[in-house]
Image: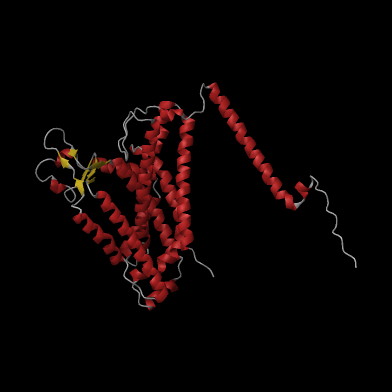
Amino acid sequence: MTIAAEPPRRAFRPSQLINDSRYRGLTIQVVALLLLAGLIAYLGHNLVVNLRALGKDFDFGFLGNRAGYDIGQTLISYTNNDTHARAALVGMLNTLLVAALGCVTATVIGVLAGVLRLSKNWLIGRLMTVYVELFRNVPLLLWIVLVHAVLSNATPIPAEFRGEGATASMVFGVIAFTAQGTFIPWPVWGEGAELLTVVLLLSILAALVWRSYARRRQMATGRPLPVLWVALAILVLPTVLAFLLLGRPVTFDVPTMRETGIARFNGGVNILNSLVALWFALALYTGAFIAEIVRGGILAVSRGQSEAAFALGLRPGRTMRLVILPQALRVIVPPLISQYLNLTKNTSLAVAVGYADLRATLGGVTMNQTGRELESILLLGLFYLVVSLVISGAMNVYNRRIALKER
């Protein structure tokens, strides 16, 4: 009985790194990585040499220095005696605020416009077409400046809200649109407000649990349960009951016009026209692109789906909500992510109307005062990179949840 011996292994030769397909791909990647590292090292060395020639260094210590400038719209307390880091944080929060407001509003506008553009009503369909083509084909910067000009010049000055009938000219008697901004009521938290907040959060959680239970039951038995009205009752009734039992712990500081002296509002909070202009311009502009995405997603769903739903007795509204849109989401969500990212990055145009976002604080006044151009731009780019990655990651998680589950 003979045993076949294994053939002797050939010794490794350097030529295999190029000629052998097992090693060639790895070799190319290592060479490319070394070339990239060398390029980065070369640029970094030149950067240090050039900064040294200008008498500068690479340091982020300027963030701890006194800022020395005011910011009109802030979400947290800030004075000109605070540091540049605090000013950058204020700008960061302002950027996130307008980005969040813009994404939500643009989604609502885009979905409505996209659905209505497919309406069989000729007038509604043409109006939505005009809206989409008008906003998509005019630069965003022009819309921002235009909306700001309308808000600043077409609205009354605060002095016009003084005297008899002034309250009647305010929206619901508590909201005033003026050339200096929009004055709205602001909540004042009293004793028991924390407990009321807990009740509200628990009500939201209970409404989500009911929605999930109703969906599972419908999938298991085919019998639908009322979701919208029951969820609203779960959300509203416990909160209102707790609000009354706790003695109305939350009140509202309503803006009122001073009767003497300089015409200005007391109480409430002033939302600057720059914020409102940026918010609505971004929402209307991005909403036009989202409308086309929604329209394309709906058209991608086979017409047989809606015909089958009509044959089962579903009305057009429920067919769109329960049959068409859930299937269209798989086509809508991927390009929708890009629109959210574009809207977030387009907030940097806020400097055109004087809104103090991160581009205006860290990338504007702070950079000009300290002369730290490189450090400021690197931090600014890092912020937009992180925010974009977070938005993209969250939307990709949602996209995977609604993806088709194959057997």
Residue sitting at 25 percent across and 60 percent down?
238
Q: Is residue 45 left or right of residue 233?
A: right
Residue sitting at 43 percent across and 71 percent down?
303
Residue sitting at 37 percent across and 40 percent down?
350
Q: In the picture shown, does residue 295 fall above or below 162?
A: below
Q: Position of residue 49 (x, y in %)?
A: 58, 25
Quadrant into which the N terminus falls = bottom right
Q: Position of residue 92 (x, y in %)?
A: 39, 40
Foreground pick, 8 / 272: 8
Quadrant into which the C terminus falls = bottom right
Q: Position of residue 37 (x, y in %)?
A: 63, 37
Residue sitting at 37 percent across and 29 percent down?
67
Count of number-bearing discs? 0
Foreground pick, 144 / 273: 273
Q: In the picture shown, does residue 226 fall above or below 38?
A: below
Q: Is residue 142 left or right of residue 18?
A: left
Q: Position of residue 404 (x, y in %)?
A: 49, 66
Query: Colour scheme of this structure image?
Result: secondary structure
> Can residue 133 be seen in the rendering of this structure?
no
Q: In the picture shown, does residue 258 fall above or below 301?
A: above
Q: In the picture shown, does residue 301 fall above or below 379?
A: below
> Can residue 72 be seen in the rendering of this structure?
yes
Quarter of image, res 117: bottom left
Task: Work out which residue is located at the far left of the displayed protein and give it.
Answer: 164
